[in-house]
Image: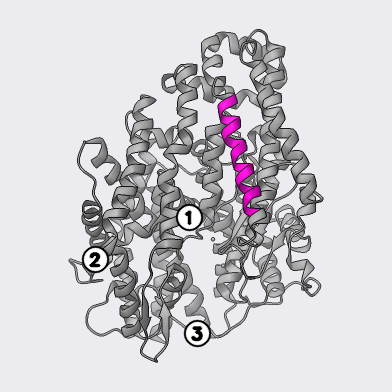
Amino acid sequence: MFLRENHTMQRRLRALLLAASAFTALAIAMPAAAQEAAPAAAPAVTVNDAIWNLADLYATPEDWTAAYDKLKAEIPSIGSCKDTIVNDSATLLSCLEKISGIQKEVLRLFTYAMLKSDENLSIAANTERKSAAQSLFVALSSQTSWLSPAILAAGKDKIDGFRKEQAKLNDTFGFMLDNILRAAPHTLSPETEEVLAESGDVLSKASDVYDIFASAELPFPTVKLSDGREVKIDQSAYTKYRQEPNRADRKIVFDAFWGKWKEFEGTFGANLSAHVAGHVFEAKARHYANSLDAALFGDAMPEAVYRTLVAQVNENLPSLHRYFKLRKKMLGIEGDMEYYDIYPPLVQLDKKFPLEEGKAQSLKSLAILGDEYIGYLNEMFTKRWMHVYPQPGKATGAYMMGSAYDVHPYLLMNYNDDYESMSTLAHEAGHGVHTLLATKAQPFEKSDYSTFTAETASIMNEMLLGDDMVKNAQTKEEKLYYLGMELESIRGTFFRQTMFAEFELKIHEEAEAGKPLSGARMTELYCDLLKRYHGDAEGVVKINPTYCVEWAYIPHFFRDFYVYQYATSITGAALLAERIESGDPKQREIFLDLLKAGGSDYPYELYKKAGIDMATPEPYKALIKRMNTIMDEMEALLAQ
């Protein structure tokens, strides 16, 4: 299953905030599955029930504007702390509280602006409001660029002394202060920090260019399918028509779509190369060993996690190849299986899952997570926290937005009454419950959670839902459908995202070695990976060289080494789900404690507290075991 692209919006918000100050307090979402007696359904949905109530943030757009004007005027006042912040413990606490309070309001302003804009992207006033909110991050960045250098100049001994004098300094800001002191080797002079802060807008332009060109200006081709339909194959149509049951149609779609991207290989290559160069520049400027070191530093993530993931995936490619062979058999493909054969569903399921059924089924399937979890889930489903259905101008995809600490999370959906919609609902609701648990247990300054742990609850929800659907399937075909969807989730989230991670590492290593990084070279590197992962040499899936320009289509490469965390998240979720489904109530509490921890510790350490060491092979082997068990069950069903 391809990742829900709107999650990248949340990543950009994280990047903006991290550039804005030394704080990392951002409770964000990410960008995802029955048939026994289900709980009673909630009341029938009306139009208003299906549209979120943004008045919980600001009563009216005019109230938002007033709050924006007030905050914009207040941000420069942070400068008064610049020369006094480390004079004494009371001043340090007062200044940190002031900055934190402003930051919290910036996030609330942005949350409203983004949600309002995504209701209808064609309304200029809403787009302009969102742009204005984004500008506050730049202003905050400029006004707080001196913070880390000032704390570092004071020194650890002095800061530790202040923390002893002021309990709140330790309880609320201790983790942040430790993080700043840890970053001493990578923190520059106040003047240089200010320059780097101001450069953030420039260094983000490659991503902006990609978004505009790939989504709006690329001249997508129109094709004629075997039944006479003429279809313009833009990005949305590609994801739809690559699943066509007719192989010839799938080939037409692939040839046209990737042929068009190939025409602009050089342009996309130059743009991505510019982004990589910027990332390499920042890593060098801050004295990191390399770009990967820089990207992992914020979460104190051992490099062994990244490299163990890549090594384990490569070691277990035979399981992926087994899946492709099973897919070939189920689709009845004769001759070579091609890259365009990996997307059609293995079994067609002609069954609807209306919203209320999706809610009820999620509540039933996730009941194993306990009353507290289900209580939050039910609250999310019964209050106006979701914008549910597609409508003209609405943002596509799905996401959870949980950055307004004092309010509650919001969910954007494009619900289509199908199984994937129900699975997506459970996925995004997992992010929502994670946010609610973290904000209840942690102060704003420690409520943010890393991408590394963010996908754990959401993927856990998908897995528990999927397991329940399999258990209660009414027919063999229905059971095969749910099992196939679970396999596809593992392929897309574990194997495919790790392939992306391996490609991203390779292009950064080439740039750091001073090698020219053209579009053609990126295609060559990506093609080698595509062929290895899909077993081209072994005759498993044949890779047409034209399709090797796929790297140009992936927006994740502008997010700097975050995609690997999707693969680690599905790994951790699988192991936690297995433990919880074993019936041991302690495992449920361990899982909930992980969610409640928010950003109070580094994510690798939080996982270790949950009994999972992601720098070792064991968790990955557990996911591969789950994958092979699913295939065993499918093969047994097919043999009946």
Viewer-nearest of discs 1 and 3: 1
Q: Which residues are magenta?
A: 126-143
Q: Is residue 397 left or right of residue 305?
A: right
Q: Which residue is mark 1?
A: 570
Of all residues shown, which one is farthest toward the front? 124
Q: Mark 1 to mark 2: distance in Å?
A: 23 Å
Q: Amino acid at mark 3?
A: Lys
Q: Quadrant of residue 252?
A: bottom left
Q: Residue at x 55, y 15 (%)?
A: 150
Q: Mark 2 to mark 3: distance in Å?
A: 30 Å
> Residue 476: which numbered mark, if any?
3
Q: Is residue 160 left or right of residue 640?
A: right
Q: Is residue 627 left or right of residue 60?
A: left
Q: Are marks 1 and 3 in contact (CB under 8 Å)?
A: no
Q: Which residue is mark 2?
A: 535
Q: Amino acid at mark 2?
A: Gly
Q: Are marks 2 and 3 in contact (CB under 8 Å)?
A: no
